[in-house]
Every structure is written in C-alpha cells, then in structure tokens.
Image: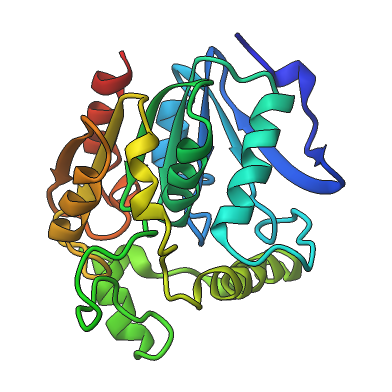
Amino acid sequence: MTVTERIGNVVNVQGIDIEVKTLGSGAPIFLLQGEEQLEEGSAFVADLARTHQVIMPSPPGFGKSGRPDWMTNPDDLAYVMLDLAGILGLNGAPLVGCSLGGWIAAEMATKDDSRFSHIVLIDPYGVKVGGPFDVDIQDLWIQHPQKVAAMKWFDQEKSKRDFGAMSDDELTVVARNMESFARFCWEPYMHNPKLKHRLHRIQTPTLVLWGEQDGVASAAYGKAYAGLIPGAKFATIAEAAHYPQIEQPEAVLKALRAFIA
C-alpha cells in the first residue's frame, strides 16, 4: 500500500491542519518523531526510506501543525494521530514513535491498535514507574543546557545544532516545538498517571528500544515501561543516550527491521 498520491503537505483532521511529510516508497511506516523533530533529514529516516514509505506527521503544536487551545496533553494528541492514520488509510502499517512521539504512540495503541501491524517505541516518556519521590525522568527545564545535553547524548558532538545557519522559519519551528513540548508535558511532569493502567490493552506486537546511556530516563525505566505492555520485547542500544535513532541509526534499524519482518 502506498499513500503518497493521497496526501499533500497538510491534512485537515477534524478542523486541525496537520503537517505531513513523506519520504521513500514501498510499504508505509507511520513515524512519530521526537519533540525536537531531529529524525527529519537524519540518516535513520533516509535509510528507512530506502525500503519503506516513511510517513511523518507533526502532531498539533509541532512543526507547522495547528494547535487548538483545547488540547492540553499527549492523550489529546493521540486521538488526532489516530484520526489521521484513518484518513490516510493506514491499515497493517508499523507504528514507530521516538521520545515524545513514543509516548503519543503508546497512548494511541491503548485506544486502538487494530490498524497497526507492529509498534516500536524508542525511549518514550509517558509513565511513572517509581514511587512518589523517585525521579523517573530528569527535569529538562531547570538544569543547565550543558547538563541536559549530557543526559540526552552519548556523543556530545551530535548535540550541537547550528542555529545561526537556520532561517527565521526554521528557528520559529524549533522554538514552537519546545513551547508545545512544555505545554503538553509540564503538568503532570512527563507522564500521564492513567497510561500505566492502560498499557495492558496493547495487543499488537511491541518492541521497546532504549539507549543504554540515556540520562533522561534510564534503561531500567525503559525495561519497567516495556514490562507494562503484554509480551513486549525490550532491547538496549549501546553507545547511545536518549536519541539512539540519531546516534546509532544502523543498530536501531537492524533491530526495527528484524522485528517488523
């Protein structure tokens, strides 16, 4: 199934304009990027597009997608992404989510996972696995940017972005992504208290991948997350932190392709 001819750059979903980008051809994969949208233009997506049509929507508030005032959390975003998948006629496609995109994908799957053949979650946020005083996910907004970068990246060189070379439109998207990330994830911090009680509803084969050196949320957190999903497989990616799909694209693609084959 190919859907390139059916979509433009914007798809209207229940009155919300959603930016949708595609790359490659072949069987589709529905990819929800992380909050920084680093996957777009990455080696990870370019290589995946050699064998699949990669469909990358920007959830409400991200990229150039609309953001209605009534939307307040990733649970709301999940319904819009499910509606979009229906509009695009995605049946039997893998659903892949990275970081915040992984959280949204998990929310989607607890509501209706029937149209997806496989689910792959890469370092997702979304649940509280420890006690009330345990720090499951580091606070990314009150710490020094260099410390945050050290949490997110195994290779610090890969954390660097040349903002000076970006256009005003590109910088606006970067700022908007961070604003929406804070808006949707600040309270309660980086999780939906209800999600851990819903993950048992996921019946689609699921793989959870985690960067071994993730300093934002540890591999132990990732393993506990996977344990809440019936039958989910869990694997770590060496020499990678919170964005293994960017730092170690070959290892992530190898695991992904083996799982969805």
The figure's colour scheme reads rainbow
Q: Is residue 25 above or below residue 119?
A: above
Q: At 17% across and 39% down in the image, what residue appears?
A: 234
Residue 49 horizontal/vertical position (percent) = 49, 25
* In the foreground, 220 or 158: 220
Q: Can you say whether 208 is above or below 180 in the image? A: above
Whether residue 213 is situated above or below residue 151 in the rendered picture: above
Task: Say which quarter of the image contains residue 239.
Answer: bottom left
Going 57% across and 68% down the picture, which residue do you hit? 184
Position of the C terminus by quadrant: top left
**The one of 86 and 209 positioned closer to us in this rendering:** 86
Q: Quadrant of the N terminus?
A: top right
Q: Quadrant of residue 135?
A: bottom left
Coordinates of residue 254 in the picture (x, y in percent): 24, 27
Q: Relative to 96, does residue 173 appear above or below in the rendering?
A: below
In front: 113, or 165? 113
Q: Residue at x 25, y 33 (%)?
A: 230
Left or right: 55 with respect to 199?
Answer: right
Q: Position of residue 36 (x, y in %)?
A: 51, 61
Q: Nearer the viewer, residue 205 or 31?
A: 205
